[in-house]
């Protein structure tokens, strides 16, 4: 479209209802995809900003002013491009008009949806984004001389009602809560790094049994933090921060080293009953191939039989970048290790990918096992998961067995192995050795 054509269109559309405010209302804080006919004015110069736009299909003209104040075609933008994005930051008037050149398919991103997304971010990123946006807004508002000297925090109150941003725009300000969360996160990261140096992490071991024979087959190593003031800290309190900060890779490597150290001790106690030990491997490790080399070194240095080591990974590790995950998994399998898919059923459970990856065991999440007898659909879900796993020749491990009756039900569903408080909670090494002894005596 030529500049003249665009101008002509603008003139014919002058006075037509702009879509921006309407779309913001319709979308109610959610990103939505709309089809717009040719010649739709998405937003007009001088209107308050409400939404940003991302073009999926079609073209849009952006029309502003030349030096003489006349309308001027600034650019034509196409698929994959974002425009009108300043609406995400503040609601000062638009400086240009956007008109569709053809039928367009466009994602409309209202300002509210940004708030929701920022809240869901890593607390430090969330705080930083909020502060940057707030500072930007402050510099954009024309400040009377009298308040320019004030502290930034005070000046908004001094603005007349007219000059103030509406409440919804101010919601993104870095609140106390956001600041506290970010501070907590930063402190925790420092603490985790110090604790690693001071060797405050160690594993507890939870036995995994063959259900039909009730015989011990191995242990899962679960990380614990012996905190000098707080005492024993469980992983749910620190693994999420460790994952966001990359510390988890050090923790996972440490647990693998400890597992390799413990395996011969446990195996000696178990005699001819061959045991495995499994460790959890966070999905972050799958971002590069380095983990394969690091695992190889640990296994070689310790001299353990790699077939006695299992790595537990979750579906999310595979889904993020399936090709990369496959490469890493093949590398790990080539070392002779076994792979278990952890927490199965809670994530994406896109069953189609199971055949693609080299997996040996499937661990059914404890939420299903714990509801086996409450009349819910859990029993059907477990039955379906077991059938699927058997189809792919995988072993099935049930987590969270707390009651005797769960065992019979799981055996009936053809589940091979299980772990849970019914057999034993995760325990220190001595407890694990006692468990082996009493379990093998019974057999
Ligand atoms: P997970 O891998 O699913 O581990 C099983 C969790 O279920 C453990 O919690 C275990 O204590 C608990 N559990 C076992 N049997 C039962 C039962 O019968 N009933 C109930 N209610 N719970 C049971 P834990 O030790 O607190 O670990 C929580 C999560 O932290 C683990 O879930 C795993 O995702 C993560 N985690 C633990 N150690 C590591 C580690 O070394 N590296 C990484 N990346 N994550 C770890
Ligand atoms: Ca696990
Ligand atoms: Ca699990």
Image (cartoon, rainbow, N blue to C red):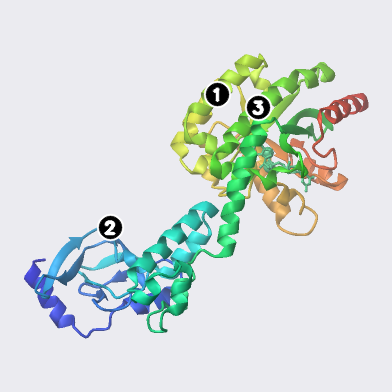
Q: Position of residue 350 (x, y in %)?
A: 54, 47
The percent coordinates of residue 5 (x first, y second) are 9, 72
Q: CA distance from mark 3 to mark 1?
A: 10 Å
On screen, 269 above or below 352?
above
Q: Earlier in the sequence, mark 3 or mark 1?
A: 3
Residue at the disc numbered 2? 81
Give x and y (percent) for residue 113: 45, 66
Q: Residue at x 46, y 61 (%)?
A: 130
Q: Position of residue 352 (x, y in %)?
A: 52, 44
Q: Secondary structure at mark 3?
A: helix
Q: Is residue 252 above or below residue 5?
A: above
Q: Nearer the viewer, residue 71 or 360?
A: 71
Of labels 3 and 2, earlier in sequence is 2
Q: How many marks?
A: 3
| Dot placed on the residue nearer the N-terminal end, 2 or 1 | 2
Dot 2 alpha-carbon crowd within 10 angstroms: few under 14, some 14 to 19, many 20 or more:
some
Q: Quadrant of residue 391?
A: top right
State whether residue 265 appears in this view. Answer: yes
Which residue in the structure is indicated by mark 3?
Answer: 256
Badge 1 is on which residue? 294
Label 1 lies in ligand 1 vicinity (Cβ under 8 Å): no
């Amino acid at each position: 479209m030529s500049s003249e054509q665009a101008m002509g269109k603008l003139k014919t559309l002058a006075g037509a209802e702009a879509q921006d405010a309407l779309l913001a209302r319709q979308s109610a804080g959610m990103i939505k995809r709309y089809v717009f006919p040719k010649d739709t004015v998405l937003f007009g110069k001088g209107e308050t900003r409400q939404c940003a736009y991302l073009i999926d299909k079609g073209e849009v003209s952006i029309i502003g002013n030349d030096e003489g104040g006349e309308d001027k075609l600034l650019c034509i933008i196409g698929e994959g491009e974002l425009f009108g994005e300043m609406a995400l930051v503040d609601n000062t008037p638009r400086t240009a008009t956007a008109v569709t050149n053809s039928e367009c398919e466009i994602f409309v991103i209202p300002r509210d949806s940004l708030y929701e997304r920022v809240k869901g971010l890593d607390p430090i990123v969330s705080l930083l984004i909020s502060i940057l946006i707030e500072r930007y807004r402050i510099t954009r508002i024309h400040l009377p001389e009298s308040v320019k000297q004030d502290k930034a925090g005070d000046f908004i109150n001094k603005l007349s009602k007219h000059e103030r941003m509406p409440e919804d725009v101010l919601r993104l300000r870095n609140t106390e809560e956001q600041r506290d969360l970010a501070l907590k996160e930063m402190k925790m990261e420092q603490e985790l790094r110090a604790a690693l140096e001071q060797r405050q992490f160690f594993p507890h071991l939870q036995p995994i049994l063959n259900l039909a024979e009730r015989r011990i087959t191995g242990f899962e190593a679960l990380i614990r933090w012996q905190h000098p003031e707080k005492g024993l800290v469980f992983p749910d309190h620190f693994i999420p921060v460790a994952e966001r900060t990359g510390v988890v890779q050090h923790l996972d490597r440490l647990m693998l080293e400890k597992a390799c150290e413990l395996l011969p001790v446990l195996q000696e106690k178990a005699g001819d009953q061959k045991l495995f030990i499994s460790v959890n491997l966070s999905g972050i490790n799958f971002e590069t191939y380095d983990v394969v080399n690091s695992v190889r070194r640990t296994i070689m240095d310790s001299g353990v039989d790699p077939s006695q080591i299992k790595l537990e990974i979750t579906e999310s590790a595979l889904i993020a970048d399936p090709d990369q995950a496959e490469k890493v998994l093949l590398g790990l399998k080539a070392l002779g290790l076994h792979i278990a898919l952890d927490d199965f059923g809670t994530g994406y459970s896109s069953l189609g990918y199971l055949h693609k990856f080299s997996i040996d065991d499937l661990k059914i999440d404890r939420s299903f096992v714990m509801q086996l007898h409450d009349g819910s659909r859990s029993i059907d879900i477990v039955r379906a998961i077991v059938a699927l796993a058997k189809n792919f020749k995988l072993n099935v491990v049930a987590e969270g067995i707390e009651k005797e009756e769960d065992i019979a039900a799981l055996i009936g569903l053809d589940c091979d192995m299980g772990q849970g408080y019914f057999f034993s909670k995760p325990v220190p090494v001595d407890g694990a050795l006692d468990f082996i002894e009493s379990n093998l005596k019974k057999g």
